[in-house]
Amino acid sequence: MKHSSLRTPFFLVDRKKMKANCDQLLTKAEQLNVKIRPHVKTHKTMEGAILQYGGKPVGPITVSTLSEAEFYSTESSDILYGFPITPDKFPTIAELNINNDVCVVSDHPEIIRRLSDFLEGTETNVPVYLKIDAGANRAGFHHTNVEEIASAAQLIEQLPGLSFKGLMTHAHHSYAARNREESQRYTYQENKNLSRLLKALQADGIYPPEISTGSTPTTMNQAEAGVSTEIRPGNYVFYDRFQSDIGTCDREQIACFVVARVAGHYPERNQMLIDAGALAFSKDLGAQHVRKEATYGEAYEFPELQIREVSQEHGLVGSDESIDYDRFPIGTLISFIPNHSCLTAACFDKYYIEEDGNIIDIWEPVKGW
Ligand SMILES: Cc1ncc(COP(=O)(O)O)c(C=O)c1O
């Protein structure tokens, strides 16, 4: 199969780069001496999860939807549904827990009680992580609310059908870092906040079995395990322009591309039209939002070509330099690196897998909620 025979836009994965990124995390975990529970939401494929485990059977993973939990339950027996649980999802969680450990997350005692009530008579045990807000201000008990956290942990321990799995955080705010040093500061701060919390809980006789941490920026810049016992990055499989902008990876490590065709020339405004817009890239500006000239992606081989505007299927490519239109006739294929690979990959129902310039496979991500 040739790239030129494919209908555009399509999502292309450089398998060697992706494998190297996955191996980098395995080495990192070994160095830190922590377990991994990688997030699969960036790629949502079985092939990707197998790469995350270095070609071995898929171990513990984190998922973002119950569709993912169902899809992966044939290969992984230890799944964390990483979004705070709501009652509509109890039946699926109970069903999946018949053959697997499917852990849930909560920051709400009432929901914890209702889950235990729901499980009554089912002989199912659901492991529960308490979600801790260690600085991100997104979800979770604030890390300074020791009393609330302690009483929620005791509640889980006392209620039938539940077991206390530990504490989990996600340093969503680390994406505001501007460089590697700032990322490291977020990692250090998260660990400091968790460490204080842990000491206070232990003084109350509460010993969380796991301390689960990890965004891609904080994990890949983590020098010591600190209090973490498991790490859960996900974006690192592909990386993207966002991670490269904030110094988590080198541009060369980015393993995914949106391939689009030139569909129009507009020399009067120094722009070209491509057949990939917001439904191929998303509208996430990533770290670009702090820039005056934020753009939606850039051509991999021609970084001076940037996507300046997107609407549903239209993308307008501009440049600070004069575009050489002879170089990009109508129909020319251009590979773009996306700002945020998780959102971009989710726009596609198949990925073309490339190795040494050849398309060797097609992967199909799981869709839906
Ligand atoms: C709960 C949870 N864990 C882990 C991750 C993975 O983090 P990243 O996307 O930075 O790799 C996410 C991402 O949003 C998440 O929400």
Image: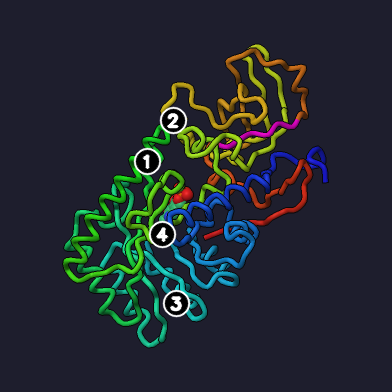
Mark 3, Cα crowd under 10 Å, few <14 / some 14-19 / many 20+, is many
* Residue 218 in the image: above or below residue 322: below
- The quadrant where residue 81 appears: bottom left
Q: Which residues are magenta?
A: 333-338
Residue on which disc 2 sits: 289
337 in magenta: yes
Using the image, determine if residue 202 lies above or below residue 227.
below
What kind of residue is marked 1?
A: Gln
Q: Which residue, given by chain and number where applicable, does mark 4 sit on?
A: 83
Q: Is residue 131 left or right of residue 311?
A: left
Of label 2 and label 3, which has the lower sequence position?
3
At horizontal 49% and vertical 36% (from top left) the residue drawn is 242
Q: Residues within 10 Å of mark 1 (few under 14, many from 20)?
A: many
Residue with the most extreme front position: 31
**Amino acid type, residue under disc 2 in the picture:** His
Find the distance from the CA under tag 2 to the CA under tag 4. 26 Å
Looking at the rendered image, the disc whose residue lies closer to the viewer, 2 or 1, is 1
Q: Nearer the viewer, residue 253 or 272?
A: 253
Per the model, the C-alpha gap separating discs 2 and 1 is: 21 Å
Work out whether residue 337 or residue 195 is closer to the camera in this orientation and state it. Answer: 195
The secondary structure type at the circle numbered 2 is helix
Residue occupying image coordinates x 35% and y 59%: 168
* Residue topped by disc 3: 94
Specify whether 128 is left or right of 2: left
Task: State if disc 1 and disc 3 touch (CB < 8 Å).
Answer: no
